[in-house]
Image (tube, rainbow, N blue to C red):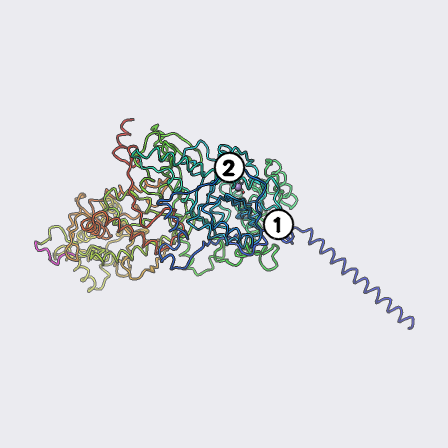
Amino acid sequence: MNNEHKTRVAFTIVTLTTAAIIFFTVRRMRRRKQRESPSSSCYSHSEPKPQSAFKRVLADNSYAPFKHLSFNASKNNGNGSSLHPFQAEITALLQNHQPEIELGAEKLEMNDSYVWVDTEMQLKKLVNVLSKEKFFGVDTEQHSLRSFLGFTGLVQISTQQEDYLIDTIALHDSMEILRPVFADPSICKVFHGADNDVLWLQRDFHIYVVNLFDTSKACEVLSKPQKSLAYLLETYCGVNTNKLLQREDWRQRPLSAEMVHYARTDAHYLLYIANCLIDELKQLDNENSCSDDKFHFVLEASRRSNMICLQLFTKEIEASPGESAALSLYSRHQSNRASPSISNETQFLSIVRQLCTWRDLMARIHDESLKYVLSDQAIVALASRLPASNSEIYNSIVQTDVNAETGLSSSIPSPSPVVCSHLTDICHLLANKLVNHGDIYSVILQKCLGQNGNCKLNISNYALLVNCNVRPTLSSKRSSLKNPRQHSKKASRNLFVKKFSCKSPVYHNCRIFANDGRLLCYCDRKKLEWYLSRDLAKVVDEEPPAIMLLFEPKGRPEDEGNDFYIQSKKNICVGCGEGNHYLRYRIIPSCYRIHFPEHLKSHRSHDIVLLCVDCHEAAHAAAEKYKRKVASEFGIPLYVRRVIHPGQETEKPNDEGGVSPLQLRSAAVALLRHGPRMPHDRREELTEIIKTYYGGREISKEDLEKALQVGMTPHERRKFEKKRGVSSKHSTGSASAVPYEGNDTDYAPGMSNGDTLKVDTLDGSYVNEETRSGDNRQDDSGKPSLASDLAVDKATSNGNTIVVKTTDHDDDETSYSLVDTDESLNKMQPNVVSDEESIKDEDTTQAKHHSKLSLLGHGPHGKQVVDHLLKEYGEDGIREFCQRWRQVFVDALKPRFLPGGWDVKHSGRRDFGEFSVYNHQKRETADSME
Ligand code: AMP
Ligand code: MN
Ligand code: ZN
């Protein structure tokens, strides 16, 4: 090897070494940078969580509604299949169930032995034991800080012999083994305050409790001074318990001795306490046996317990995630602020909203609770200070959380690992740079879970990414690129939702108790105030408010088997659970209901439910279809067939005089609007229709205008006259000679938004939505059409044809009315609505129209059907008729969120007592006594 060669080799080695050093250094620097840069890798990769080991989750963090356990159709015989899977079993228990708890030589003391169940084998053994028991005690503990929806960390089951602690984390995917014993109606499960436990068991394991005895419900019925478990443990067992332990981290393994003791105590004494309480209830029943008060204490406690079982777990789904949190945060914050400028305020609210959306989505993605991700006070601080760098954001959060620190929240790191891993997102968000490209929702989702996303995909967040179709609607600029027709349909639907859905919660869930502490009903605040202002009640609870009546109410809902009225009602669509908008829907169409005898009308709240626009549409379509069925079944047509002008009636009842009101109206409109431009033949044809109404004589323009007004209410007519102004008042001459200059609405009062009648602008003829064939009505606006049903009192049946005499329009008393649809729409937007009162008001409003009649709606049909039912079958006929409508409703919607106790067979007799706000006679007396 010569020197030259040596030098070359040496050079090559040096070069290669240098290259290698540079390569490795750069790589190391890159890696370090990656580690330091918080958003490039998320804590979720390195922090294992117990729930990551779950193989299945029933309630994931997506926006898709929770799916309940369902059986094959045969079990539910197609009847209410979407209700509670054990609806029938539980309903049977509500009727007449006597809880039987008999303890042997009871062993009250809690010794040191208990069984820790954490293998499938042990769980099967336990099921074997439990299936031979008549009753057992149950309690559950859940963990909610490091999980979006929370999960059950422990289930405690106690029999007379043994305490079992089930490790529901280890056994998460095997818990279904317990379903049969929990659903077995012959085994009584004893809980204390089961409301949450029942829902948690459904959420995590599809375990449904059937046959429940709740010791807190027993306390209620016994009017105990307190109904906490701590109180019962102390009073009946002489045991003190430290309830602070319920806030421990129940994911911890092994559990501390203290936690084991606490958990066992919660279940161990339940059977003994239940036994004592049942004895007391029986005692009261015996004392009461001779009085004519039918109240049965044991049955009542059992019944209230089993009502809890009917509750169904639902995910709270917001159309815009974080929106409600943002608004509540904002309003709380506003009250603490000096008056800021409007533009600052707008920006502040917008940032609060974005941070709440960000927090909601981050919590779902990382399976953490909202408060773990970012505290409310930190959101307010960020939105008001607008820190501009990662470190400023970091410091801002730390400071705020330290200041707000209350002993308990100290277990939450501040800022949370979620924030630390995603500081850059917050930085962009505060600088208004996050939403430049598309909406915040898809941006975050892609950054976190998309290809090359930073965060860990798991079974809880997977569906967020996959089910993009059930993602919430957020304003997005791209939406305008969609099919414009589709877009406008969607826009007008949104507009409709905004305009007509209930603006505030319909059900207020205020409670009224009888003077012995029994719950009488739920109602709105106005009703509470009514009693309070008259010193007829006193306040017994603040939020939600409750009052106790100071007098003995006549009749109690539970005496009459009306479970429904003492159910707390949720402000959601009973069909699909949508909670962001809802309209009231009347299950019994009003064209029938307004003709019911008053006492059958009074159970309105059962048959008025909340529905979202889509479910409303579906239910309405089914009802219209069924109306046609009723029409053909009873041989009573839906529409008035003929009207005759006053003075034209003949003596012969079968005279083929008159004309259909619909035809009359459309002919008049067409002639007035397009008369002069119409082909001669068409004009003759239409004129002939008007002539027939007037008995064949020649007609003037005034006749045409009068024909147009057939069916208007006096009010509408006045409005109509006013709108027309003087121009037409003084015009004379024949219809064909004088074209009327005016806009469409002048000729179609009551035919604005939501009317069921439409004008075909080509020939001016009306098409009635309800008479169109098929049920897939394609309404341009996508809004439900609202039938205008009114009373008729002058219709006489004449075979299959209704002939109605109309009188002169100048006579208000006897004229015929068409419902002002604007008015009926207004009724759908309650401000503060009482469950029943507002409905009452509406009936009264409609009753005012009773002397007038709608010739275009289904009013005459409704009256004839109801009269027929009452004549042939009496009130039972009406009840049976109502059940048919409820069945139509259930079949059409398969509603999954009907309140517990809602029943197709509901008989709904309510007797309004002396001081009831529904008792109008008494109410007037009470008012006048003031
Ligand atoms: P308990 O059966 O009373 O021990 O309560 C069951 C579960 O409810 C506990 O494991 C907690 O997750 C939750 N819980 C009940 N009360 C509270 C509370 N005051 N604060 C936080 N969590 C609670
Ligand atoms: Mn407990
Ligand atoms: Zn992440």
Residue 741, x across and y down, in percent: 26, 53
Amino acid type shown at disc 1: His
For the question of whether residue 738 can be seen, the reply is no
- Residue 11: image quadrant is bottom right
Identify the secondary structure beneath mark 1.
loop
Residue 482, x across and y down, in percent: 46, 60
Q: Spot the residue most to the bottom.
A: 1
**Range shown magenta:** 651-658
Identify which residue, 879 or 501, lies in the foreground. 879
Estimate the spatial distance between the alpha carbons at disc 1 and disc 2, rounded to whole Å.
Answer: 28 Å
Tell which tag, 1 or 2, sits nearer the viewer: 1
Identify the secondary structure beneath mark 2.
helix
Q: Which residue is mark 2?
A: 334
Name the main secondary structure of what is drawn in magenta: loop
Identify which residue, 885 or 232, lies in the foreground. 232
Residue 746, x across and y down, in percent: 27, 50
What is the crowding at mark 1: few (fewer than 14 residues within 10 Å), some, or many (at least 20)? Answer: many
